[in-house]
Image: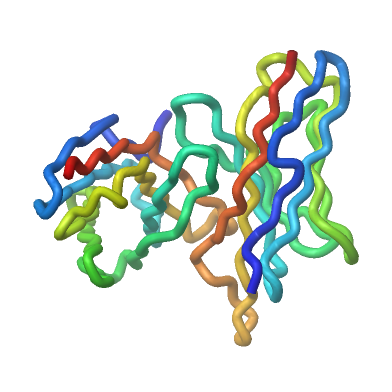
């Protein structure tokens, strides 16, 4: 049972435009959400996070939105740059299950120059 | 401040051999996590350790896998009698303990060890 799902395996965007990556979850006990970026042959790099008590968090070109009623979060990157091309994972933490993260399957973002 | 270190980066083993993967957390971090990523999948939690203690091993296979985080030295993930299905990328992450005694929510990952079982 996949508790965190990223339904789009890939996304292609033109440089300068907005990239929107989506993530859905089923476990209402998740209280903290994170986005990681991963290049081939490297470990995931932390990008941005959001607590379940908020609905938006912004850091530079990256904004994460959380819709708790829909159990949906999204990552917006604007403007997109070719260096943003990578696999993006959303992850969630449960407030009563230690500190383990549950990851989605990832979305491969390709930003075309 | 060096990031999370993992070695080796690549490890090739034959079926039945043992694999030892090492992880040194970021300086000042006392919480270590191991995750496994199979090809074309997301990362799956395996185990969460603090110094000398296993806190949560709910993601660890019951047989052949073990983990430790001794008082001195790196955390070790050990896989005995490896099989082809163990071939994967194994990632270690660490997080600090807050001055208040809580745990930060963000985990920082190492570059991973890619295990290939022939």
From the viewer's perspective, is B10 left or right of B14?
Answer: left
* Image location of residue B15, percent across then percent down: 81, 14
Seen at 65% across and 68% down, the residue is: B2
Position of B32 relative to B89 (above/below): below
Extreme residue in the bottom direction? B99
Position of B21 relative to B115 (above/below): below
Colour basis: rainbow
* Image location of residue B117, percent across then percent down: 73, 18
Position of A69 relative to B45 (above/below): below
* Image location of residue B52, percent across then percent down: 85, 61
Which of the 4 quarters of the picture holds residue A104? top left
Report the number of numbered marks. 0
Seen at 85% across and 20% down, the residue is: B81
From the viewer's perspective, is A8 left or right of B94?
Answer: left
From the viewer's perspective, is B67 left or right of B41?
Answer: right
Seen at 25% across and 48% down, the residue is: A82
Position of A93 relative to A7 (above/below): below
- Quarter of the figure with the C terminus of chain A: top left
| Between B116 and B99, the one nearer to me in the picture | B116
Seen at 50% across and 64% down, the residue is: B106
- Quarter of the figure with the N terminus of chain A: top left
From the viewer's perspective, is A57 left or right of B10?
Answer: left
* Image location of residue B66, percent across then percent down: 81, 39
């Amino acid at each position: 049972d996949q508790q965190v799902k990223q339904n789009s395996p890939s996304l292609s965007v033109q440089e300068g435009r907005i990239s929107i990556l989506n993530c859905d979850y089923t476990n209402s006990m998740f209280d903290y959400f994170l986005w990681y970026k991963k290049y081939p042959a490297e470990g995931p790099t932390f990008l941005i996070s959001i607590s379940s008590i908020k609905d938006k968090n912004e850091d530079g070109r990256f904004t994460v939105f959380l819709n708790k009623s829909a159990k949906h979060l999204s990552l917006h990157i604007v403007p997109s740059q070719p260096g943003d091309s990578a696999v993006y994972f959303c992850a969630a933490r449960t407030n009563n299950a230690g500190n383990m993260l549950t990851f989605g399957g990832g979305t491969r973002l390709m930003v075309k120059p | 401040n060096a990031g999370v270190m993992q070695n080796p980066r690549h490890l090739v083993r034959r079926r039945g051999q043992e694999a030892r993967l090492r992880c040194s957390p970021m300086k000042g971090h006392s919480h270590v996590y191991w995750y496994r990523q199979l090809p074309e999948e997301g990362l799956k939690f395996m185990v969460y350790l603090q110094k000398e203690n296993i806190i949560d091993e709910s993601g660890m296979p019951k047989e052949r896998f073990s983990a430790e985080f001794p008082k001195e030295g790196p955390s070790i993930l050990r896989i005995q009698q490896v099989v082809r299905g163990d071939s994967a990328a194994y990632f270690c992450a660490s997080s600090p303990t807050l001055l208040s005694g809580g745990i930060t929510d963000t985990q920082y990952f190492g570059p991973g060890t890619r295990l290939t079982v022939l």
